[in-house]
Image (cartoon, rainbow, N blue to C red):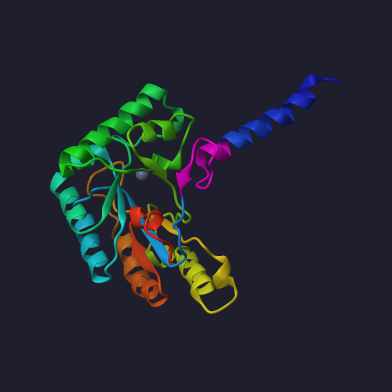
Amino acid sequence: MNSLIIAAPTALATLGAIAYGAAHPRSQLFGRTIYRTNSPRKLAITFDDGPNPAITPKLLDLLDRYNAKATFFLIGRYVRECPELVQETVARGHEVGNHTELHPNLLWQNPTKVRVELRLCHDAIRGAIGTPPKWFRPPFGMRNPWVIPAARELGCRTVMWTLLPGDWQEKPPEWLIPRMQPIAEHAQRNLGNGSNAVAARMGDVICLHDGAHRELNGDRSRTIAALEHWLPRWRDLGLEFVTIGEAVSTPAR
Ligand SMILES: [Zn+2]
């Protein structure tokens, strides 16, 4: 029998498994990650690709209105350009994490390049706020076997998500708002009086963007508009808006 006939499906299955391990937000193949909170009551709102002087200050004001704490995954080169904005973000009760120096797809990087990308952003954040970050999120969510160990070397846990609504796309809030609906559906199902409430022990991590990795001052006004819609509704459903630290370490309720 032609061995290719046997080998081809096996190779395809292996490729499929690797693709899943590299890209799927809940995959643990290349190392353990955080991708949900420890209570259905807790929603962790996270923002990538900042700091962004055009958007982040408005977002901080919006979050304050709802007593919402969030986690910002920062690009190192933007941190060096806007250290005061990072200081203000932390001063207002939010957490910040490492999102690499230049936002490459780490899937294709060798171990040395991965380490340098993480180390430069780590140093930029420590330089801006005086303490190193505890969280890391890979650009595009892409991992290879050395990404999560490199984060761990820097004392960081890797954070993924349960919901990625796609707010980087140039589409109006009317498109984005329904794509954030699953958060409300989960809250209605898990915080209501129904029997399902007992079963749910985990809450969502939503991945949004206050910055744009290609340019500083990218337009993320649609993300703000969508949050203006959802924050009061999520609050009325009983959700609390927590940082990743609160999402995983304070006792679940
Ligand atoms: Zn990013």
- Residue at 46 percent of width and 44 percent of height: 33
Q: Nearer the viewer, residue 93 or 116?
A: 93
Give percent across and percent down for residue 63: 26, 65
Q: Is residue 199 left or right of residue 219?
A: right
Report if residue 179 is visible in the image. Answer: yes
**Numbered circles on residues, count:** 0
Instruction: Give the position of the N terminus as an image quadrant.
Output: top right
Give percent across and percent down for residue 200: 54, 65
Which segment did they paint magenta?
19-34
Q: Nearer the viewer, residue 54 or 72?
A: 72
Is residue 37 within the magenta segment? no
Ligand 1 quarter of the rendering: top left
Instruction: Give the position of the C terminus as an image quadrant.
Output: bottom left
- Residue at 31 percent of width and 27 percent of height: 116
Give percent across and percent down for residue 44: 38, 59
Q: Nearer the viewer, residue 161 or 243?
A: 243
Give percent across and percent down for residue 245: 34, 53
Report if residue 54 is visible in the image. Answer: no
Query: Which corner quadrant of the image does residue 77 belong to?
Result: top left
